[in-house]
Amino acid sequence: MSVFDVIRHRRSVGKVKPDMPPREKIERMLEAATYAPNHHITEPWRFIVLTGPAREALGELMEQSLREKMLETESEKAQAALNKERNKPLRAPVVIVVASVKPETPKTVDIENVEAVAAAIQNMLLVAAEEGLATIWRSGEPSRDPKIKAHFDLSPEEHIVGFVYVGYPAIPHPERFPTPYQLKTEWRGQE
Ligand SMILES: Cc1cc2nc3c(=O)[nH]c(=O)nc-3n(C[C@H](O)[C@H](O)[C@H](O)COP(=O)(O)O)c2cc1C
């Protein structure tokens, strides 16, 4: 498949099988990430690959994070929401936490590091698609919670840019038809 075909083919897949992808495929995703463009070559990415009980630990923190925001936690509805939150990281056999760390040189602008990490994540998603793996880039409130950041040795100023869920697809390949670029593009300086 050409790069363009992989780009076109990649979709977010929210439902995957419990089967564990081979470590080599995950490592290929990680290596691809490191080829992303990054200003001043700060390589601002950090990866934490969660499998098995490491996902449960994240789930417990996510539940705790939600609990702290809730007005009440005892009702059936609240309990169901907490339970759902705790189980979220178990939706895939592998969850890769992809973070942007503090700029190491004064020349670097924080947002540029985040942008570089976003490019790194896209590389990961594309290689996964090429490998026949299903992925979804998730974020949400947990990605901004300082306690969850601390669990991954990140300071409050650093960023969890994404939780990349990885597995084998358990649903048919979703279709998406993006708005044609012509409707988002203006050409200037030529007829
Ligand atoms: C920064 C970022 C954060 C995202 N966070 C979530 C999320 O929390 N939950 C989710 O279901 N999808 C999330 N997504 C995936 C988008 O929903 C998905 O890319 C979009 O629906 C387009 O679908 P596609 O990836 O199949 O083209 C996120 C994507 C990006 C770029």
Image: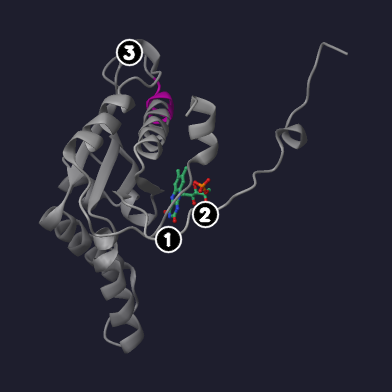
- Magenta residues span 109-115
Residue depicted at 65% across the width and 44% down the height: 178
Tell me if mark 3 has few (under 14), some (14-19) or many (20+) residues whose alpha carbon lies within 10 angstroms of its own: few
Q: CA distance from mark 3 to mark 1?
A: 39 Å
Along the horizontal axis of the image, is 173 left or right of 100? right
Along the horizontal axis of the image, is 3 left or right of 133? right
Which amino acid lies under the numbered mark 3 shown in the image of this protein? Ile
Q: Quadrant of the C terminus?
A: top right
Percent x, y of residue 75: 31, 88
Residue sitting nearer the eye, 131 or 179: 131
Give the answer, above or below, for where 2 lies relative to 161: above
Mark 2 close to ligand 1, CB under 8 Å: yes
Give the answer, above or below, for where 172 lies relative to 49: below
Which amino acid lies under the numbered mark 1 shown in the image of this protein? Ile
Q: Which residue is mark 1?
A: 171
Tell me if mark 2 has few (under 14), some (14-19) or many (20+) residues whose alpha carbon lies within 10 angstroms of its own: few
Magenta stretch mostly in which secondary structure? Answer: helix
For mark 1, give the secondary structure.
Answer: loop
The numbered dot on residue 174 is 2
For discs 3 and 1, the disc positioned in front in the rendered view = 1
**Residue 135 seen in this snapshot:** yes
Q: Residue furthest left?
A: 53
Q: Which residue is mark 3?
A: 41
Q: Are marks 1 and 2 in contact (CB under 8 Å)?
A: yes
Q: Is residue 110 magenta?
A: yes
For mark 2, give the secondary structure.
Answer: loop
For mark 3, give the secondary structure.
Answer: helix
Residue depicted at 69% across the width and 43% down the height: 179
Mark 3 close to ligand 1, CB under 8 Å: no
Q: CA distance from mark 1 to mark 2?
A: 8 Å
Q: Quadrant of residue 43?
A: top left
Q: Residue furthest front?
A: 1
